[in-house]
Amino acid sequence: MRAETHKFKLALDQILGWLALLALSPLFWLLAALIRLDTPGPIFFRQVRIGQGGRPFVAYKFRSMVDKAVTMGLGLNVAVDDARITRVGKFLRYTSLDELPQLFNVLQGDMSLVGPRPTLPYQVAAYNDFQRRRLLVKPGITGWAQINGRNAIPWEERIRLDVWYVENWSLKLDALILLRTIRTWAKQEGLYGPSGINYDFRPLDAELAEGVSNI
């Protein structure tokens, strides 16, 4: 990514991030009130994720599950009929509105509007050299893998798509992803794996890494 276009992408993230936050602020307050009234616990779910260059940061989401849900049931995995999901949380997850607080991460400079989704430390610790390429850019609220299958495709394929994005990035591609994200959101595609449970992460086999340029 050239320095000039990199700076332009940063500027767009800040401008569009602030505009989105201002426009959606009434919705933020409404969702915060519904979460607080629905079940005990914090409004926001905070979790350490790994960003550009392997740097950890705290990612924000609206809480869609009971408090301390990661210590119960499927742990970090989530099923479509997961009992830990709250009543308001079902709506938040179905509409993907639980991701809106990541606009704060964009404004803080930890994330971009478009990029590979930020992953967990234990996943990054198991990355091979190919997988680590997805850490060359900032993680995003939406991304190439998000509009090409999202959680309905295995991690191996998601990472191949993310690396393709890193190696083929352009402002035009970002614009395409943002537009197609609206369509994906409207159709609510790829929320869970085919079995109704999100795929487990596992390191990418070397042979699967080959041919990424053919995606």
Image (cartoon, rainbow, N blue to C red):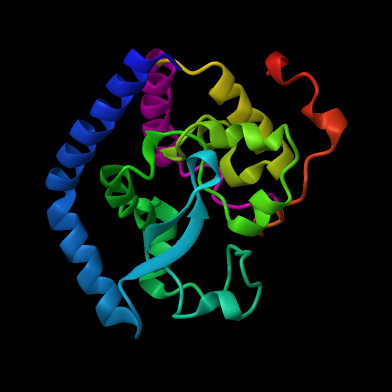
Q: Main secondary structure of the magenta part?
A: helix
What residue is at 58 percent from the left and 71 percent from the top? 82
The image position of residue 157, as x and y in percent, is 70, 35
Pick the residue in front: 73 or 190. 73
Task: State whether residue 4 is above or below residue 147.
Answer: above
What residue is at 42 percent from the left and 14 percent from the top? 2
The answer to whether residue 74 is visible is yes
Q: Any magenta on residue 86?
A: no
Residue 78 horizontal side relative to residue 156, left or right: left
The answer to whether residue 145 is visible is no
Task: State whether residue 161 is above or below residue 74.
Answer: above
Residue 166 horizontal side relative to residue 125, left or right: left
Residue 157 horizontal side relative to residue 51, left or right: right
What residue is at 65 percent from the left and 49 percent from the top? 124
The image position of residue 143, as x and y in percent, is 48, 33
Task: State whether residue 127 is above or below residue 37.
Answer: above
The residue segment tinted magenta is 171-194
